[in-house]
Amino acid sequence: EAESTAVPSKQMLHSENMEMEPETMETKSVTDYFSKMHMGTVMTSC
Amino acid sequence: MDASSILVSMRDEDQSFHVRYRMEASCLELALEGERLCKVGDYRAGVSFFEAAIQVGTEDLQVLSAIYSQLGNAYFHLHDYTKALEYHHHDLTLTRTIGDRLGEAKASGNLGNTLKVLGRFDEAVVCCQRHLDIARDLHDKVGEARALYNFGNVYHAKGKSICYSGADPGDFPEEAMVALRKAAEYYEANLFIVKEIEDRAAQGRTYGNLGNTHYLLGNFRNAVIFHEQRLLIAKEFGDKAAERRAYCNLGNAFIFLGEFEVAAEHYKKTLQLARQLKDRAVEAQACYSLGNTYTLLQDYERAIDYHLKHLIIAQDLNDRIGEGRACWSLGNAYTALGNHDQAMHFAEKHLEISKETGDRSGELTARM
């Protein structure tokens, strides 16, 4: 009887602690935008 | 027009140009500082600078799009999803207005991710599809892969949201299983591309989520195969957090395969890494999993040891629900050992906490 009370419940086995991988958010950067603009200017002036 | 009015008009134009120039410079400086702060993880301060940049204003719509997008992402990281949704929506409207297709694809991706977190799966699917369509139109392989990964995440989250609590993986309602199977298909499609373009980091993420999807589908052997791949890539990159996630997920899968000793070994690795990373909440979770695993192995002494460790951390973190679970588990383990005084002590503690947290089922279990 003692043993049966110590058996973990289904809830306990359940995957509450499943570890998901992070979301990948798309990035837009002001720095990158100006770097590209600058590169464009350099290319045009060449 | 006489000479003096021409002169006044020129001065006005000059002044207006000067004001516009100052405004643009100031907006840019604020946005760059916001960008720098977000890069170092200070999203709260970053938001202040981006919002100030918007107040100043800019006539460069590409800059405005970048500010909206970064504000949306900053709010996403701060878990303020309503605000994140607002800014990603502004970004989408703007990019569509100016006909920036790549920008529209990115805004759609971010909007989809945010809608997914908010549980608005049907709308998220529409965004993922737009992201995918544009990426394919532009022959953008990286974008296409990312859209497929996001699609997988949306269907995974949808499937998980339908799962009845208490049901075992693999025994979920058909609607949940359909969504999970779709998630697996999207992850597989993503994997095909990220292998082709040799993006190992992306492969790692996909293997992890594919493993979790197979776990929920009840395909535990497949789950193990994918999580082992994830672990391998995490080690290649020295990514300790990803390594910890993989060990924890492997532990979960081995539990359902009935290989409790192997599960315990993986949870021990999780615990070790959680301590290295100084993540107390994960450390508590790993102790709880280890306590449960040793209960399954009927090694109650060790189970008590880990449940006590869990209890101490839960108390430190003021996590009453965690504390209640630890007390319930300790009550069970002490009962199994025949130590009825300790069993009663923890059962009473569990009852007290269940009442406090309004956990009705916990309260009923405690009374039993």
Image: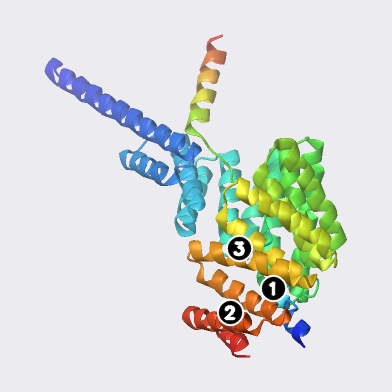
Which residue, given by chain and number where applicable, does mark 1 sit on?
A: A12
Q: CA distance from mark 2 to mark 3?
A: 14 Å
Kindly state the secondary structure of the residue where label 3 is placed. helix
Residue B282 image position (x, y, % from top left): 61, 57
Q: Residues within 10 Å of mark 1 (few under 14, many from 20)?
A: some
Inspect the image, locate mark 2, and give the three-letter code of the amino acid beneath it.
Answer: Phe
Image-quadrant location for residue B368: bottom right
Residues B93 and B241: in front is B241
Q: Give the side of residue B131 with respect to residue B69, left or right.
A: right
Q: Is residue B94 visible?
A: no
State the mark number for residue B309: 3
Which residue, given by chain and number where applicable, does mark 2 sit on?
A: B346
State the mark number for residue B318: none
Residue B78 image position (x, y, % from top left): 47, 52
Q: Are marks 2 and 1 on the same chain?
A: no
Q: Are marks 2 and 3 on the same chain?
A: yes
Q: Are marks 1 and 3 on the same chain?
A: no
Can you say whether A2 is above or below B298 in the image?
below
Q: What residue do we see at 65% from left, 75% from top?
A: B329
Kindly state the secondary structure of the residue where label 1 is placed. helix
